[in-house]
Amino acid sequence: MRKLTIILLISFLAIIILASSVLSVNSNLQASVRVLLQGDVDGNCKVDIFDLAIVGLCYGQSAIGECSSADLNNDNKINIFDLATVGINYGKTC
Ligand SMILES: [Ca+2]
Ligand SMILES: [Ca+2]
C-alpha cells in the first residue's frame, strides 16, 4: 500500500512538472493573425492588376507551386471563380 502511495505521489509530481513546462512553453508562444483581403493574391494589401495578372497567368493550372496563391477558393484549380474573386474585390485595400 505504501509503495502504491509513493508511485501515485511521484506520478502526480511528474504530471505537475510536465504541466508547468507545457504552460511555460505556451506562455512563450506568440500568435499573429493576419486577415487576408479576398482577391489579394500577392499579399500587398491591394487587389489590383498584379493580382489579376497572377490569376491570369495561372488560369487553367493546378494550384501548385507559384500558382498556389492564385487559388482563392481552395478548389485546387485556377479558374473563373478565382478570377471572379479578384474582379469582385478589385480596387479594395486592407
Ligand atoms: Ca495584391
Ligand atoms: Ca480555385
Image: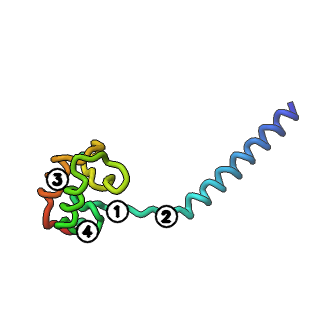
C-alpha distance separating marks 3 and 4: 17 Å
Q: Is residue 2 left or right of residue 75?
A: right
Mark 1 and mark 4 lie on one chain; the one further toward the N terminus is: 1
Mark 1 and mark 3 lie on one chain; the one further toward the N terminus is: 1
Asked where in the image residue 2 lies, by quadrant, the reply is: top right
Q: How many marks?
A: 4
The answer to the question of whether label 2 and label 3 lie on touching residues, with beta carbons closer than 8 A, is no
Which residue shows up at 22% across the image and 63% down it?
A: 51
The residue under label 4 is 45
The answer to the question of whether label 1 and label 2 lie on touching residues, with beta carbons closer than 8 A, is no
The residue under label 1 is 34
| Badge 4 amino acid | Cys
Of all residues, the one furthest to the right in this rendering is: 2
The answer to the question of whether label 1 and label 3 lie on touching residues, with beta carbons closer than 8 A, is no
Q: Which mark is residue 30?
A: 2
| Badge 3 amino acid | Leu
The percent coordinates of residue 71 (x first, y second) are 27, 50
User: Which of 9 and 17 lies nearest the eye of the viewer?
Assistant: 17
Depth check, mark 1 against mark 3: the one in front is 3
Which residue shows up at 64% across the image and 50% down it?
A: 19
The residue under label 3 is 83
Which residue shows up at 56% across the image and 62% down it?
A: 27
Image region (quadrant) for ligand 1:
bottom left
C-alpha distance separating marks 1 and 2: 13 Å
Asked where in the image residue 88 lies, by quadrant, the reply is: bottom left
Judge the density around disc 3: few (<14), some (14-19), many (≥20) Cα neighbours within 10 Å.
many
Q: Secondary structure at mark 2?
A: loop
C-alpha distance separating marks 1 and 3: 22 Å
